[in-house]
Image (cartoon, grey):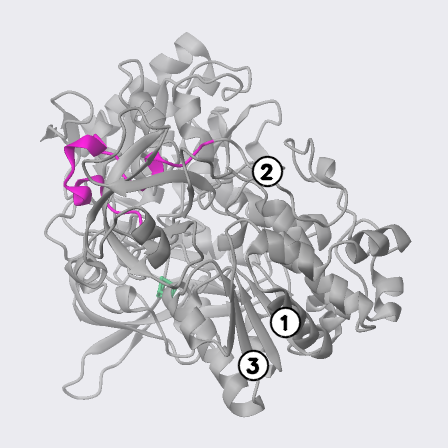
Amino acid sequence: MPLDSALPAAGAAMPPASGAVATVRSACPHDCPSACALEVERLSPTRIGRIRGNKELPYTAGIVCEKVSRYAERVHHPDRLGRPLRRTGAKGDGKFAPVSWDDALDEIAEAFLRAEARHGSETVWPYHSGGTLGLVSRWGLDRLRNAKRYSKQRSTICVGPSSSGWQAGVGMLTGPDPAEAAKSDLIVVWGGNPVATHVNLMSHIQRARKERGAELVVIDVYNTPTVQAADRALILRPGTDGALALATMQVILSEGLADRDYLARLTDFDPEVERHILSRTPAWAAEITGLPEQDIIDFARLYGRNKRSFLRLGLGFTRSRNGAVAMHAVSCLPALTGAWQEEGGGAFYARLEDWGLDLNLAHGLDLADPEVRSLDQSRIGPVLTGAPGALEGGPPVTAMLIQNANSAEVAPDSRAVRTGLARDDLFLCVHEQFMTATARYADIVLPATTFLECDDFYMGWGHSALTVGKRVLEPFAETRSNHDVVCGLAKRLGAESPAFDMSAWDLIDTTLQASGKGRADDAAAKGWIDCNHPFEEAHFLNGFPTADGRFHFKPDWAAVGPYHAGLPELPDHWAVTEAADDARPFRMVAPPARTFLNSSFTETAGSQRREGTPTVLIHNDDAAAHGIAEGASVRVGNGRGAITLTARLTDGVLPGTVIVEGIWPADSYRDPACEGMGINQLVSADPVGPVGGVAFHDTAVWVKPAGKEAAGAA
Ligand code: SF4
């Protein structure tokens, strides 16, 4: 019996008023910084109605995105996987027959043991990604990995460049609660689109605008809904944010707007750094970014004169070969002005560290062997196809359990990913909620619960609370939670940890108590645990979390990650992006669609209606030059592949930039020439320095009317 099935469905219920629907507290598991505390209408033990934001958690403030508000469409979707399946056709065909849970788990365990006997334990690569950010559901797989000495995973695909760039200066992935934006005089949203992807932030920004007359500046590469909501927008070329940051600092220094006392007390700023920054003029940056020089000067003066200024740094501008360098350069700004000292001032990127959680038991951290290799999650294609260096000198990967990941569509270099997944000598188990492109390659597919059908807790990496969600519904059909699958396999594989014999709820309760954060039942009743830091700590008033307590204008990239060769020694624009040329005259950016989240929600009718069809945004002048009309079918490609999209003409990008929103299922392109692959077939899997990660927004392409692309175009 699944462990969760032994528990009563018991999210903290608020008794309904007479005739009203029962409302149950939960928390959103999706790959989104908001980690919203939720209120779910429970219509019966197996059905929900609407989902709303919990009004009592100040960051959620009663607001959730539209895709989760209509989650009933997803959890009750007719295409949910309900039974374990065994492959009957060729890999990728999607032909399967039902199998019992016991037989499925036995087969997986036997395949893992066989692979281990032949190649050693590192041949097994458990793999997870952001389909859920549950601290039990996602990272519980690491307990099995560590107990069995299976290959580790470097989780770089989302935050590798951004996190490493932030660490290089600030030292740790932490900072003030972004709800402080409500107390700012100037908010700069840099490389993010919260109206579409992080909706709660906008309510705090709106408060600052309404109550304080704060100004909102948005910096991005196209005219997003957040740009449209801004008082001032800077639309620049992709991969040039470092140049804008440097020129902004140049103006601040030249015009005497820097806080010299703060620089001396809490940073490593010195004459070498100053000389370097003064050489990066607005004219220099205008040439690189495509921004008018005066716009750069005006922004710099606005920022330099508003000490109570808050930078909300998104991931978008870091998904580039120079992303870590750009993040570091931008993060220098509040150190230069001393904005960190103000309430409502400073910067926030993500709180991915500093939660004070003891996760040894839940994640098996104390079982990890430092000698076991660690493979780069972003390079699943090169890993599975044995590309030089990708296997870190170890054996081939011949067995995998994939949870919460649809790598066939989400990972870069889709062609290599699919070639790897189709290998006859790879045993693949995929534990999923729907028959994804990745699951179609599996030998065994296991049906997974959604967050409403299992217990978990979550780090609010875009705020300062742990959110908690106890099971709301009975598991659909024969679905089982990730925790149940990990525990079921552990028994068959001889893996040892007390956590393999615990229910998910007991594991959460034990973890919270070991971390000094109270009892799980109390947290579930409230919906969250407040983990805000005191002001002095959150704003680094007494020093930064670096070895010398100072913010580093001079990053030690070698200490941050292995791919540090060539990274600049001072904050800078690093000109290493995939350059446009005559054969590939456009730079393509592939940001999220508003109602998809990676490849999740692409199956729901509401999201499909909202998003319409896969499109490419192209500047009017570029379209005219290439004979492309509004609504025309165009091919977009490079040496890695090509896809067909519908052209949308706009003035909302700079000439030379094209935008393709959303990770659409490959069959959305209705194009046999796509060979069952989507947008990420065009994206390189080369690691981004210094720790790895994907340059999703750093791709040179050609765009041509369909039927006119040159065969073999580069
Ligand atoms: S805004 Fe983000 S965290 Fe909140 S409900 Fe939507 S996807 Fe979940």
x%, y% of residue 130?
A: 40, 47
The residue wearing badge 1 is 299
Q: Which residue is at the front of the view, 75 or 309?
A: 309
CA distance separating discs 1 and 3: 11 Å
Q: Residue 591: which numbered mark, if any?
A: none
**Amino acid at the residue labelled 1:** Phe
Residue range highlighted in magenta? 662-685
Task: Check disc 2 and report the residue beneath it.
Answer: 576
In this view, the residue in front, 283 or 249, is: 283
- Mark 3 Cα shell of 10 Å, populated few (<14), some (14-19), many (≥20): many
Could you tell whether 323 is left or right of 145 in the image?
right
Mark 3 residue type:
Glu
- Please say if the residues under marks 2 and 3 sit with CB atoms less than 8 Å apart: no
N-terminal of the pair, mark 2 or mark 3, is 3
Name the kind of residue labelled 2 in the image. Answer: Val
Q: In which quarter of the image is the C terminus?
A: top left
User: Mark 2 or mark 1, which has the lower sequence index?
Assistant: 1
> Magenta span has 304?
no
- Residue that carries the numbered disc 3 in the rendered image: 215
Counting from the top left corner in percent of width and height, residue 74 is at: 20, 57
* Element type at mark 3: strand
Q: Is mark 1 on a helix, strand or loop?
A: helix
Left or right side of 206 for 660: left
Q: Is residue 705 left or right of residue 145?
A: left
Residue at screen point 25% across, 38% down: 643
Q: Please identify the quarter of the rendering in which residue 277 is found.
A: bottom right
